[in-house]
Amino acid sequence: MINSIYQLVAPRTVLVKFEDVQSEGKVIVRPRYMAVCHADQRYFQGRRDPAVMRKKLPMALIHECMGEVLHDPTGVFMPGEHVALIPNVAGRGPEYIYENYAEGSGFLSSGRDGFMREFVNLDPDRVVSCEGVDPQVAAITEFVSVTTHAYERFDRIAHDKRDRIAIIGDGSLAYTLACTLSVLAPKSELIVIGRNAEKLALFSFAAERYYSDSVPDDLTFDHAFECAGGEGSAEAIDCVIAHVAPQGTLMLMGVSEHPVPVYTRNVLEKGMTVVGCSRSGRADFERAVEIMRTGDIQNRLRQIIHVDNSVRNVKDIKRVFSTDLQTPFKTVFEWEM
């Protein structure tokens, strides 16, 4: 079976590769809707370290995708069924290690071809039905699964006093996490701390919202999720350390390209637990779809989705990445290649 794979070979340069791919025992899916992640954008624009770019390229981008089943020899999925695609290549390890952290784990669109292909062939356990979710919203299932994974880890680690949970950041990740927490931790008051008035306004369902430069001195919360990343990581972590209650848990979710200084004295004196959290696995996808099937959550998630024009050629791929630079949240597009 010959497949067309649209690979990034250099910054802003996409070429088509034709490949005879294995179909035996695989679920064959035609991608329908995709979403651009900051990681995709960094590769496309060449904003990663040159050594990293040389190591990872060439590869097809995009790891947030839903599609339609063309064929499933196992009979688990029906032709035409809407499914979310899992980009994580599960590693092997003890049961207590999550699949996304296990030795040998990998990730599509990070040194391996992502979903910018004519069709995708995956093992059945890398496919999850997303029937009942609007296809444009289902495109960000992987993104939502990152937040369900973070909550799963938090729920296992953090102490039981969870009256007030803070989210530091006001971007797509922070907003999606807030939606997830509103379902999985409905009794907890959500406190959101960010920089952008327009973005903060979307968190209308949060109990409290503050600008990062005017956080009250007496503000306190039981636990926190850091979703700022980048240049905002240090400030976000400092904010949590200053305001979290003793023995609170800090979940680190924002990605920083550079080392971030941490004031360890207060971390130690407060007895804090600091947990790194990245990517997700099948169970997190299943939980994400379950959450996304509720009408309220779908409507909320639509608030951060910009639906761009369809992609029908390589020129359109470049347009999508250019458009994404101008949109404050998630860019979703229909894939018609």
Image (cartoon, grey):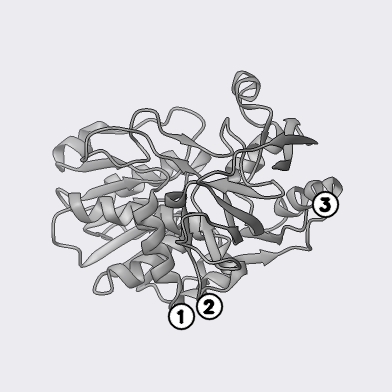
Residue 316: assigned label:
3
Can residue 154 be seen in this snapshot? yes
Q: Secondary structure at mark 1?
A: helix
Residue at image location 45% in from the left, 44% down from the top: 254
| Label 3 packing within 10 angstroms: few (<14), some (14-19), many (20+) | some
Residue at image location 25% in from the left, 65% down from the top: 164
Question: Nearer the N terminus, badge 2 or badge 3?
Answer: 2
Residue at image location 49% in from the left, 50% down from the top: 86
Question: Nearer the N terminus, badge 1 or badge 3?
Answer: 1
Q: Look at label 1 and name its amino acid.
A: Asp
Residue position marked by numbered label 1 in the rendering? 296
Give whichever of 8, 1 is nearer the camera: 1
Can residue 170 be seen in this snapshot? no
Q: CA distance from mark 1 to mark 2?
A: 5 Å
Task: Tell me if 91 is positioned left or right of 97 in this view.
Answer: right
Q: Vertical placement of 1 versus 58: above or below?
A: below
